[in-house]
Image: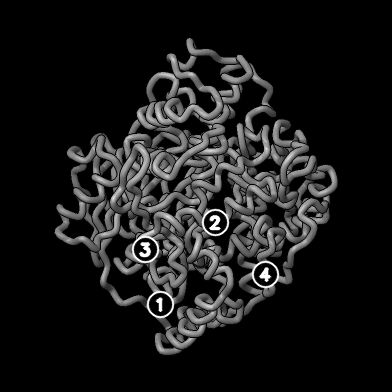
Amino acid sequence: MDGYWGKILVADLGTGRLFDEPLNEKYARDFLGSTGLAARYLYDLVDEKTDPLGPENPLILMPGLLNGTSGPSVSRWGGAAKSPLTGHYGDANAGALFGAELKRAGYDGIILKGQSTTPVYIYVKDGVATLKDAGGLWGKDTYKTQEAIKKECKDKRTQIACIGSASENLVPYGNIMSEYGHSLGRAGLGCVMGSKQVKAIACRGRMKLPMQDSERFRKFARKAMKEVKEAFLSQWMHEGGTASWVDSAISYGDGPTKYYTAPTMAEATKISGVTMAEKYETGHTACFGCPIRCRKVLRIQEGKYKYESVEGPEYETVIALGAMMGLDLDMSSIVYLNELCNGYGFDTISGGASAGYAFYLYDMGIISDKDTGGLKLTWGNVDAAIALLDLIGKKEGFGAIVAEGTKRMARRYGRPAGEAVQTKGLEIPMHDPRAYHSMGLAYATSPRGADHNKSDGYQVDGGVGHPDLGLNADDRWGDKKAAMVEKSQNYRALTDSIGICHFAMIPFTLIVDMINAYTDWDTDIDQLLKAGERVFQLQRALSCKLGITSKDDVLPELIMRPIQEGGQEGHVPNMEKMLPEYYALRDWDSATGKPSKERLEGLGMSEIAASIDAK
């Protein structure tokens, strides 16, 4: 099967046995790779009774279909498990180099089963996997862990996916980290890895990929590379990185501030991508094969925390660890906060939002110094924010409460459920649905819970159209968003599974050409878009299998309160209109939220329809 090695590495951690399992070729053909293929394998292995932190919950890591090839910006790899934060389907994807290295090391994916009795790490090199002792690594941060493993392997090009002490301590939104600040960052997959006492997976591969026609592939990859290099979005992202969105967020009211209760802070420009580029940038880094090079390398010699060379924080982190808590930060402080989270290895979105909720509760008088262990969580208190994030990583004191996430925090303090800004238990990212109404629909319907990367809503209505999909900027406050959200969700399910970065504007014809040259398929645009819908509907079915219903497709009450000042101008998304229209397009049952039997069978998933009793 060209494009695949035909084998999955399975680690039975309870026995310490590593073995190869033949790739399910139908699953691979239907769900491609990364989060799509991982979700299909996960579907067979979990149910509502599965304990997310028990040995029965697998952690599945998969490279994207095109990882490791010379295609441009095809570095994205992903994972899936039952989430310890939400209790249902969880997935995440990341860039950097790990996915490509895993593919070049001879595997189509890794499944971790059971639990080890002692800390271990897995070393994969050119088709051979070894289980190694990690007792000396346990307790190390994610940076020192990578350094130690590379030294032990005697190869600096070894790529490592690892956890920090946050996941060792079972923080439910713990990350899996790789390189310098790249993270498999949501839904707590690192926490699952920590529950299995797997500190890291290290890969080194120099194997020639199983490609159907390498010459044809290189020809199409060169054309695609040229398109990506010349695209306006690529140039914008290279110059400013994701944090360049801060300026737009201020204009549009898109950056949540003081826990979603205030207009986006204008002071955030001091830590924006533009400011990074103008005052602190010394270079760029890139994910595997990416010409965009959007990651910024900074030199900071002013402020409390000095850095000779450090990667700058992304947009989500800048807002979550800044405006969310009302913090007026300088570049030194935001970099320090970001590095704190990266070292401990926990999600800056859920971590920042949960900390922001703690500040909100303190401001409301719901909690006091007695509850916080003396932390004065007044809006803008940078020292208190640093101390709180440190406690989250250690899962100590008041930090252990905030580490549980906003939904559990609201329950603990007897607050209304709609006060915790999350959907399906996952904190809403830093794109406010009152600024872009399409994002409200995307958050409410995303299978894993609130997810800004499962739709292009904020990008499209922010001015970045998608001509291949017929998506162009529209009234950001309009309520005719169902078709756009549905189409872009299918497309993002597809690109995630292929491994394509969201910022790479590769013409659809070249995506098709590269896949056909890489595999032995004869696919086309329609078949690939159908594959994207198949992945999304499968993930939805899996969520339903694990207990999600239509009652969970809602936005929290707090984020539906209008903010009159700033870029939102008092607008809120009309969910009563958009959601039924979306359900009709998806063919989901209005009571159960399940995809219909007819739709699932039309996508070739009769067994999935039967397993959830779809009607």
| Residue, disc 4 | 466
- Between residue 198 and residue 413, name the one nearer to us: 413
Quarter-of-image position of residue 108: bottom left
Quarter-of-image position of residue 338: top left
Q: CA distance from mark 2 to mark 4?
A: 20 Å
> Could you say where residue 252 lies in the image, as x and y percent from the top left?
69, 50
| Residue, disc 3 | 283
Q: Secondary structure at mark 3?
A: strand
Q: Left or right: 214 with respect to 352?
A: left
Single out the mark in the foreground, 4 or 1: 4
> Could you say where residue 33 lies in the image, as x and y percent from the top left?
48, 63
> Reading the chain from its start, which is encountered first: label 3 or label 1?
1
Q: Secondary structure at mark 2?
A: helix
> Reading the chain from its start, which is encountered first: label 4 or label 1?
1
Q: CA distance from mark 3 to mark 4?
A: 29 Å
Tag 1: residue type? Ser
> Reading the chain from its start, which is encountered first: label 3 or label 4?
3
> Reading the chain from its start, which is encountered first: label 2 or label 1?
1
Q: Is residue 487 above or below residue 372?
A: below
Q: Secondary structure at mark 4?
A: loop
| Residue, disc 2 | 244
Which mark, residue 70? 1
> Could you say where residue 102 lies in the image, as x and y percent from the top left?
34, 62
Residue found 56% across the figure and 65% down from its top: 495
